[in-house]
Image (cartoon, coloured by chain):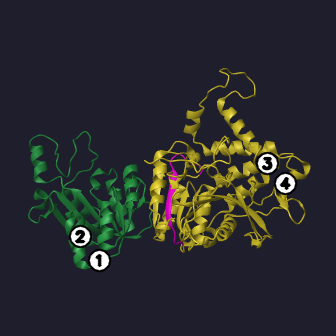
Amino acid sequence: MNATQNLEKIAEYRQDFAIIANWLKFGCKALDLGCGDGELLQFLRGSMEVRGYGVEKDDANWLSCLQNGINVIQMDLEAGLSGFEAQSFDVVILSQTLQAMHNTENIVQEMLRVGREAIVTFPNFGYWRNRLQLMAGQMPVSRDIPYQWYDTPNVHLCTIKDFDQFCENHNIHVKERLVLTYGQRIQFMPNLRGSLAMYRLGRK
Amino acid sequence: MSETSSVGIVTARTAHFSEPLKLKSGEVLPAYDLTYETYGTLNADKSNAVLICHALSGNHHVAGKYAETDKYPGWWDNLIGPGRPLDTNKFFVIGLNNLGGCHGSSGPSSINPASGKPWGADFPVFTVEDWVESQARLADYLGIYQLAAVIGGSLGGMQALQWTMSYPDRVRHALVIASAPNLTAQNMAFNEVARQAIMTDPEFYDGHYYEHNTVPRRGLRIARMLGHITYLSDDAMGAKFGRKLRDGEIKYGFGVEFEMESYLRYQGDKFAGEFDANTYLRMTRALDYFDPALEHGGNLSTALANVKARFLVVSFTSDWRFSPARSREIMKALLDNECSVSYAEVTAAHGHDAFLMPDPHYHNILRNYLQNIETGATE
């Protein structure tokens, strides 16, 4: 596959996938935590020839990965990544899973132990529509946070400002940050106008 | 899901090998027989062969029946057949009785050509490596160079893992189920108690009991009872027997009062009537000695550095004899070598025995993995 075909293929897919692909080196070794049915890894394998492994706890998702030909490891991320050697991956990805983790601090540190680089994406709780719903007196429900307060898997929602501070406090280097709203890049007032935050992280 | 069925009526065959086999211990077997069964059809380019490696008490009779009137089919019949997870419409499946066994292959109970008497205690101690060597010769005998897959649970999983190290070019996929990269001290301790039960039986005669026309039945029985306890989880035993009384009342004696006792005695008696004690001793030793990392300074990743096969590693949550943590060690060593590996931790209540149960999710995993294996030209 040539570069143009690659780009065309990228354009067809979700914008956040395309950005993640753009942050990776061709043929790199990647670990996708909470990989779901393996859609991202499949995309990265096709577009960037990524040598990827997924980590997934859920039986049905795990089986979908297997059906999709993705190498997938069944384990609970809450227990950390103790089974993985330090610096054994080029990149460790946590795509829209951070907010559902109990052991949030630990997993981000673990990602940077196992990977030379980490990519974290999460729905920005500071997005104006969320704020508006709170102002109206209700918990936000949106495309990126599609749950009612009583049945949500999300336990650690945060804003872009919160996560910036988290990185600062934990000595994590933010190499790049991109903010999207429905696939459009947001540069002006991202914490208010952006619905999805994407971070490329390293050690300071 | 499509219709599934058994492989039907099967026949066991025996292959004779006259080329001496040098064992890891240094001893040499001048010649030996291996008994095996096959299911399905070998395709034109011989790319669809799957080897099933058995565990401690298994044998070559993996699937099907010898006659319609047989009470039970082979020991992994629920896995193998047309439309089953290991689909015989696609694969050519080979099951064998391992060297040293007691179901047709050369072992302690077969005749030593040098003496004209049963080998007994003189049959050499063999290892997982030796088994793989003999299995490779069986593949040669069947005209197969590369196996599409080697599948095994427990001790069988160790053989599947050993295949990928001994013959990296001869196996494309390894399915390592409810297994371990070596036994823990606790696990070996169970084996030692089992052996002591056999060897201290007055009918053992230092392994030469055949000459005395007897078998160490009591020892073998206790060994099997102990084994069965470790193959089940506490919860599974609780669910199956609990504290149920056989006759509904306590009798203040030492007969069979609880259902659990009845089950263990039944399993023990059944086993003692059909399994050879010398084989049992050696099978447990093969388990104890398996430790591929040993020759690599204890580093399993180094031991697996040359493997080329793709792996599926499966463990069961309630298996405490071959716990998920042990399977994760295998998975990690494969990851260190950037091997293609998927790892499933199946939620199951049955303990170690779960690998033989037809749990729908577990079978779905095997079915999907096996479906993805490419086998080239089919008949």
In the displayed structure image, the side of residue B325 where residue A63 appears, left or right:
left
Residue A85, position as x, y percentages in the image: 45, 67
In the displayed structure image, the side of residue A19 where residue B90 appears, left or right:
right
Which residue in the protein does label 4 denote? Answer: B207
Identify the residue at horizontal 85%, vertical 62% (top origin). Answer: B112
Image height of A119 relative to B59, above or below: below
Question: Alpha carbon of mark 3 to alpha carbon of mark 1: how far?
Answer: 64 Å
Question: Alpha carbon of mark 3 to alpha carbon of mark 2: how far?
Answer: 66 Å
Chain B: drawing colour: yellow
Q: Nearer the viewer, mark 3 or mark 2?
A: 2
Which residue in the protein does label 3 denote? Answer: B198
- Marks 1 and 2 in Cβ contact (< 8 Å): yes
Q: Are marks 3 and 4 on the same chain?
A: yes
Which residue in the protein does label 2 denote? Answer: A9
- Marks 3 and 4 in Cβ contact (< 8 Å): no
Q: Nearer the viewer, mark 4 or mark 1?
A: 1
- Marks 3 and 2 in Cβ contact (< 8 Å): no
Question: Alpha carbon of mark 2 to alpha carbon of mark 4: how far?
Answer: 69 Å
Question: B175 or B349, which lies in front?
Answer: B175
Q: Are marks 3 and 2 on the same chain?
A: no
- Marks 4 and 1 in Cβ contact (< 8 Å): no
- Secondary structure beneath disc 1? loop
Magenta part of the chain: B307-321
Residue B60, position as x, y percentages in the image: 67, 55
Residue B163, position as x, y percentages in the image: 60, 67
Question: A32 or B173, which lies in front?
Answer: B173
Chain A: drawing colour: green
Which residue in the protein does label 1 denote? Answer: A1
Which circle's residue, 3 or 4, is located before the other in the chain? 3
Badge 2: chain ID: A
Badge 3: chain ID: B
